[in-house]
Amino acid sequence: MKRIILIALVCLTMVSSAIAQTVVPGAGVRDLNMQRNGKYMTVQMVFDLKDLDVKFNRAVILTPVIKNGSDSIELSSVGVYGRNRYYHYQRIGIGQITGEDELSFRASKMPDTVSYSSISNYAEWMEGATLLLNRKDFGCCSDILADNDGVLLDKYRTPVTDYIPLLVYVRPVAEEQKARSLSGTAYIDFPVNITQIRPDYRNNKVELSKISGTIDSVNDDEDITIKNVDIKGYASPEGSWALNERLAKGRTESLKKYVQELYKFAPDMITTSYEPEDWSGLRRYVEDSKLESKKAILDIIDSKLNPDAKESQIKSKYPEDYKYLLASCYPALRHSDYRIDYVIRDFTTIDEIKKIMATAPHKLSLQELYRLAQEYEVGSEEFNNIFETAVKMYPADVVANLNAANAAMERKDLVSAEKYLAKAGKSPEATYARANLAAMQKNFDMAEKLFNEAKDAGVKEADASIARIIELKK
């Protein structure tokens, strides 16, 4: 997991706006938050860089500055480098103009928005200080081509005394390919000892429509490409192993041919396998049953006897139970499991992602959902809805649950936050989020313990949060 964004629960000291205001040429700012946490001052904002044009031999450095009279401190910078400048600084070993804390981008790969966070030691002179943004343009030989005195963003105001968490959202790891699958089971009937499919036989129309319906759901979608159809056939233990092997193999190949002819798929696009007798399915059924001889039958199933001997012993020793299994269980053991493997194309623009979010959110990756969330004001209905959608689409994903927990804390829904954190994994960021939840629940001792664990694991925001907890405990 890669952490890239820090957002406070409530912007107490700065005016937050969902629309970026241009403050220096090519760069806008929104979601400002300047806040003191004990011994630390935190500054957060979102830079809008979509209009920033950096020539191939230029570099632009954006530096927030806290200033009050003759006292000032430069915070970590955001650097955008044209192609030549980027490779120049790489070659000479500098990497970034302002040092290793600089958040740097090559102009061709620069995102439209950049979430920014900086933590510095608080000093008394910062009371009433202003937050400025300075832009410097660099040319060849690191010559400064342009430098303003700093544009006013806002003025620091003393924060209120309630605990306000600094929430750490995590960018999901990008998928190389959005590979997905749909699966199901069809119970196709065949006449005794016959392997050819008869679509009109018994309930076969319904069972075959399960497979075609699943394929149609993705085959007719222009955003989706089917990569493979996998079919595995099973027979029941009734009869000899040799006969059942022939039936399972032949019926599976018959189903493959049916699907292939229906959709004109390439022969190598459909893969098949078979299992002559579904003993695993039989065992599950017996295990969950109330058969009088359940334990004895399970012992036979689990024995090292060959399949035909197992079948014979169950039939001869427990005829009543065998008769029941033959009628109630064996038909379900004659089945075909199928899986449709497909890929969904990537959605590259915000407008496209918004459209898919409204019509088919299941097509979006976690990273695409995350990217869309950054277009909205933190804590807004749209912002929260995206993270709620993400965790619904990916309920077992730890990053989806962690971000959903943060969004829940954003709106002070601590019940939901606790539910999501239970599935958020054990990353340092998850520990930090649990510490924030404990603090919001007024369990400051637990919060301090968890913040210290997060700090030891490398979460830099924990220092400021610990200081705030210590202050609140006084």
Image (cartoon, rainbow, N blue to C red):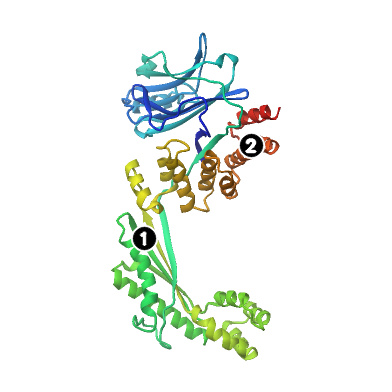
Position of residue 468 measured from the top left corner of the image (x, y, whole percent) = 63, 28
**Secondary structure beneath disc 2?**
helix
Where residue 463 sits: x, y (%)? Answer: 62, 29
Q: In the picture provided, is 86 more to the left or to the right than 234?
A: left
x, y (%) of residue 403?
51, 43
Q: Is residue 432 above or below residue 62?
A: below
Q: Is residue 349 visible?
A: no
Q: Residue furthest top?
A: 70
Q: Where's residue 381, x and y in %?
A: 44, 42
Who is closer to the viewer here, 310 or 436? 436
* Residue lying at 53% horizontally and 34% vertically, measured from the top left: 9
Q: Is residue 60 above or below residue 343?
A: above
Compare marks 2 and 1 and give the one earlier in the sequence.
1
Amino acid at the residue labelled 2: Ala
The label shown at residue 439 is 2
- Which residue in the structure is indicated by mark 1? 227
